[in-house]
Image (cartoon, coloured by chain):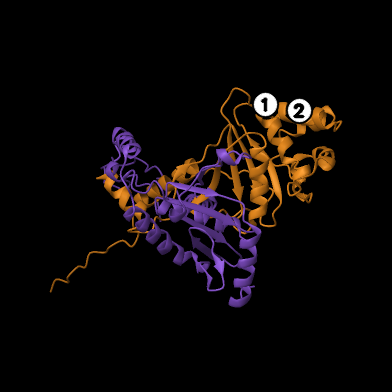
Chain colours: A orange, B purple
Amino acid sequence: MPSVKIPRKSTDTDMTPFVDIAFLILSFFIMATKFKPPEPVEITTPGSVLSQKLPENNAVMVIIDSSNKVYFTVLSDKDKSKFDAIIENINTTRNLGLTPAEKANYRQTFAVGVPFGNLKQLLATPADQQKSIKQPGIPVMDSANNELVWWIAAAKSAFAGESLNYLIKGDGHSKYPAFEAVVSALKRNDEFKYNLVTALDDIPSNSELDLYNRRVTK
Amino acid sequence: MASIDTGGGDSGHKKGPGVKKAKKLSTRVDMTPMVDLGFLLITFFVFTATMTTPTTMDLNMPKDVKDEKQQTEAKESSVLTIMLGKANQVYYYEGKLVVDATGNNFKSTTFKGIREVIINKKKDVISRHQHDETCKKTQDKAKEKGDPDWEKACLDRDFIVVIKPDADATYSNTVDILDEMTINQVKTYAMVKILPQEVDLIKATEATNGIK
């Protein structure tokens, strides 16, 4: 009697397509990942239904953290000389007596959150060690001594003739008076248009905005 | 495991006698470590990828006007004043703040309730709308822009929302209420400094409602 031969199936599956896809995804993530710039503080921005994109160049960003401390930072990837112009301006108008090395260090400093009195000390510290320094925030609450006004004036003169956006990135838990003080500093520089940095929220369905959007896309 | 199939395997060429069979080295490469590393990198990039791209909200503030004559006038009946207090509480009154022996028109609500208030007030203002020449111009402008709602462009022109956050309101409350303006398509709104009288009323309401 001839025995029935059961064909032996290999348990070795061909994983080539699987691996292909895996590496495809890997390359996608490598390309798409944009590393966050180092920030001195963690900011949780509030949500908003607006989906406008954030201008990332030629912008002044004022950060308000959860304990109402205010930081000033300039976003200018293309033209680093703007940083030099700003710190030079601050140095001369406020008589800080910064050394050239300290001024050069401003390029690497991501955000400044110290009163002018402590600026020399901050800039004397190498950029990678600045994180360990506790920054008390730029004094803004006293309207007679709102130091942010000077910083914005310096940025304004450095970017003279170019468009400059004013971004306000506030933590959701910060209190309104800090925001109001930042706005008043901008107002005193005759700037009335700002961009508030927000995270994207869903539009509530059947609200007027939702209905309007549907009509427009039709 | 993952391997490159080289189509190996003997297909049985007949060789003559005395021909020494060359030792076949496998061309199969073990790809397991490479795949391991691949997935490790994928997990790393998935975790570090910043998926929430920041967006922005435009905010235009008015110039501080000292001269009373230059200030924008608003019809009392079509103004809604919204105040933000602590613990995400919202207070509002319609028109002018009236406080007398019979009580006041100062009410409190939450962020959930304020949308209804805005919608109702807007409907109320629209129902009292009167058409005139300037209104026609607004409509024509909207029509030129290609607004599908050009006919309604003017209906709510009197509707003004005044936003007054107090010292205890958080920044996210402020953004939320501005967002509410966008959601309900309120075209005219302003952020104004809160009055001491309103602060006192908020304090009193907080005390009676037990909000800390």
Numbered marks: total:
2
Q: Quadrant of the C terminus of chain A?
A: top left
Name the residue: 38% across, 59% down.
B119
Labels 2 & 1 near each other (Cβ < 8 A): yes
Q: Position of residue A177 (x, y in %)?
A: 67, 53
Name the residue: 44% across, 55% down.
B77
The answer to whether residue B169 is visible is yes
Which amino acid, mark 2? Asn
Side of A19 where A68 appears, left or right: right
Residue positioned most to the left? A1
Query: Mark 2 falls on what kind of element?
Result: helix
Q: Quadrant of the N terminus of chain A?
A: bottom left
Q: Position of residue A152 (x, y in %)?
A: 68, 35
Which amino acid, mark 1? Ala
Q: Position of residue A101 (x, y in %)?
A: 82, 30
Q: Quadrant of residue B184?
A: bottom left
Q: On the image, numbered disc 1 is attached to which residue?
A: A158
Disc 1: host chain: A
Q: Nearer the viewer, residue B155 or B150?
A: B155
Q: Quadrant of residue B122?
A: bottom left
Specify few, some or many for label 1: CA neighbours under 10 Å numbering under 14, 14-19, or 20 or more: many
In the depicted structure, whether residue B180 falls above or below residue A88: below
Q: Nearer the viewer, residue A55 or B153?
A: B153
The answer to whether residue A200 is visible is no
Residue positioned most to the front? B101
Of mark 2 and mark 1, the one earlier in the sequence is 2
Disc 2: host chain: A
Q: Nearer the viewer, residue A5 or B128?
A: B128
Tags 2 and 1 both on a single chain:
yes
Q: Which mark is residue A89?
A: 2
Name the residue: 62% across, 52% down.
B193
